[in-house]
Amino acid sequence: MGHSHSHHGQHGHHHHHIDPEAGDRQVAFAVAINLLLTVAQIVGGVISGSIALIADAVHNLSDAISLLIAFFARKIARRPADAQMTFGYGRAEMVAALVNYTTLIVISLYLAWEGVQRLIDPPAIQGWTVVIVAGIALVIDLATALLTLKLSKDSANIRAAFVHNLSDALGSLGVIIGGVLVILYDWRLIDPIITLLIAGYILWLAATEIGPVIRNLMLASPPDHSAEDLLNHIQGEEGVAAAHHLHLWQMTEHEAALQVHVVVSDPDWSSAMVIRDRVRAMLTDKGISHVTLEIETASEACPNAPAIGH
């Protein structure tokens, strides 16, 4: 975006209170502890012959991978616009979030499937090993969650990795509760029931969070702006005869862009420019950071153009 814009309105507090480099370090650290745990669990699983340990290692590996995807997306997103990507690379984060939520939905469906199978045919008791393993995993999952908690508030990308991690933490918690109850009371059905509850919850989380991500990638209008509303405001400005071909979309998660054809009632060039500046100022004021206006006089305006879109 070569030129800087002044940010007004609701976008004034431009979510940059977290230094991006510090954020990167937190995510990198989260990746590291998950990878270390994965390796430790695989080694432990092979030595002790515990399938549970190896299964849990796979969980932590999936966490590490989703965090890695988020980490690289963050890096890419900060690259400046170039001839290839004239809008900049900001959407890399949305693509990463889409990938992470999609895999999460697949994982939760698989979990649900497993839960149903174990309801039909409850497995034998696994013993204390599994509970202890899950306890260690829970500690790591919570540490990872804490590392990414603050970042996840502002970024859909990190939020996707965070939800991945949360799902793992819930999984470990479920194993602990289910395992203890099975060991103490031989209540075998509790494990699949907990599994199904967790799977349902993760599925609901991922499905609700993936919506805004898809909307953003589909160039939907930003949630805090209405295209009709802005169109009315533009047409209500003094000197504006009509407006059409309005496009409103999100450049990045926190920046909205708008382009529109404005028909001015006064064909005189200098007064047309005054009208243009007035419209631009009004839009910038409303928190639209990228405004592109095409000025037309009533005589040469596009005939029967749709007000919104082409």
Image (cartoon, rainbow, N blue to C red):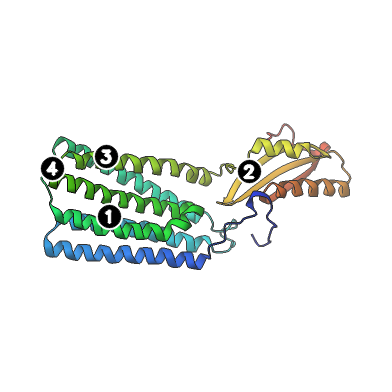
Lateral position of residue 164 relative to residue 110, left or right: right
- Could you tell me how far apart the alpha carbons at marks 4 and 1 are, in whole angstroms? 27 Å
**Front one among 141 and 64:** 141
Circle 3 residue: 196
Q: If the image is split into quadrants, where does the N terminus sit?
A: bottom right
The nearer-to-camera label among 4 and 1 is 4
Give the residue type that dot 3 points to.
Answer: Leu
Q: Residues within 10 Å of mark 1 (few under 14, many from 20)?
A: many
Farthest residue, direction top? 304
Q: Looking at the image, which residue is at 11% across and 60% down?
A: 49
Name which of mark 2 and mark 1 comes first in the sequence.
1
Q: Residues within 10 Å of mark 4 (few under 14, many from 20)?
A: few
Give the residue type that dot 2 points to.
Answer: Leu
- Could you tell me how far apart the alpha carbons at marks 4 and 3 are, in whole angstroms? 20 Å
Name which of mark 2 and mark 3 comes first in the sequence.
3
Circle 1 residue: 59
Which of the numbered marks, if any, corresponds to residue 248?
2
Name which of mark 4 and mark 3 comes first in the sequence.
4
Give the residue type that dot 4 points to.
Answer: Tyr
Secondary element at image label 2? strand
Secondary element at image label 4? helix
The nearer-to-camera label among 2 and 1 is 1
Lateral position of residue 290 relative to residue 252, left or right: right
- Could you tell me how far apart the alpha carbons at marks 2 and 3 are, in whole angstroms? 41 Å
Q: Is residue 91 above or below residue 119?
A: below
Give the residue type that dot 1 points to.
Answer: His
Marks 4 and 3: CB-CB under 8 Å? Answer: no
Lateral position of residue 309 relative to residue 50, left or right: right
